[in-house]
Amino acid sequence: MIIDHEDISKASFRRVNSKTLDHLFLSQVEKGANCPPFVSSAILDVAKRVYHLHSSTESQEQLKPGQYRVIGILSSEPAGKVLEECRKGQAIVTLDAGQEDREIRARFGIVALRRARLLRICVEACEQGIHLSHEDIAYNILNCSLRTVARDVRYWHQKGIFVPTRGQQKDIGPGLSHKVMAVKLYLERHHPVEIARRLYHSLKAVERYTQCFARVITLHEQGLNLTEIAFVVQISQALSQQYLDLYHQYNTAEYRQRLDEIIGKARGGLSFSKDPGAPKKREKEVQ
């Protein structure tokens, strides 16, 4: 059987279309109430009229500027399960981070900005219990080709950073979160500007990750458990655990002074904005 490019594209768009809010509602009604499609469609029409919903977009009141509501597969759904049978959910992701994104584009170029956005979106969705597919990212969010998404995911993997997409669920591998990687490099005494360049992040983002790490360690040393730390710092337990693992790995005689320095600076208001040595030359874009 020969499958041409057009068939593949049509199949991809069918998968994307199955993740609209309307389809999510219809699927839940059909499975929950065991009713035929025409009944679920009628219920959807009534619901739209009652609640004055003229489209499948939800109210944007809770969204901040630059945020975007996406639909993906629940992280609890096993890999290999047929898409139509998977439970779906929503996540709020940051498509445009404002000044941080403008800084990335000005310093590293538009390719770097796309890669940074892809990583951020996938991590934010994953932290909310949602896995996005390459089709979701390419067609619904970044408006690029599937090949571009695959290439960008591979780029991050080569740097040792795991991108949590639906397709990678079966093989998480040993990669670190980009936040943990930034702190790891800083612990190893890499310059903040170099870290920002390597990870396509702004200095503010690197500063924020380091401050968050310092807060986690401070609370840990005060005797709080993992659940309490995650609640106080307002991050996931998974990220809290990764920060603690990093702390235990580097809590040695060689790095103890660096750890104390990070914690001390964070208490006094850590800032990289005045760090010397920032190169002014723009890095060449990598296609």
Image: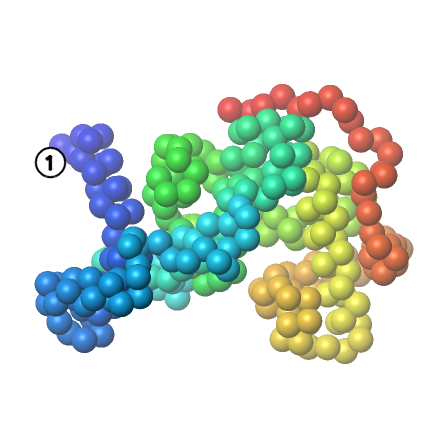
**Residue in front for this viewpoint, 32 or 210:** 32
Q: Taking the image as drawn, is residue 226 in sight?
A: no
- Answer few, some or many: residues within 10 Å of disc 1's Cα (few below 14, many 20 plus, some between 14 and 19): few
User: From the viewer's perspective, is 19 left or right of 262?
Assistant: left
In the rendered image, residue 169, in percent from the top left (x then y), is placed at: 41, 55
Please say if 161 is above or below 43: above
Kindly identify the residue that appears in the image at 45 percent across and 55 percent down.
60
Kindly identify the residue that appears in the image at 85 percent across and 38 percent down.
275
Disc 1 secondary structure class: loop
**Residue in front for this viewpoint, 66 or 113:** 66
Q: Which residue is mark 1?
A: 1
In the rendered image, residue 75, in percent from the top left (x then y), is placed at: 41, 62
Tell me how the rendering is colored.
Answer: rainbow
Please say if 243 is above or below 202: below
In the rendered image, residue 160, in percent from the top left (x then y), is placed at: 58, 44
User: From the viewer's perspective, is 116 left or right of 40?
Assistant: right
User: From the viewer's perspective, is 151 left or right of 16?
Assistant: right
Point out the image quarter for the N terminus: top left
Q: Quadrant of residue 203?
A: top right
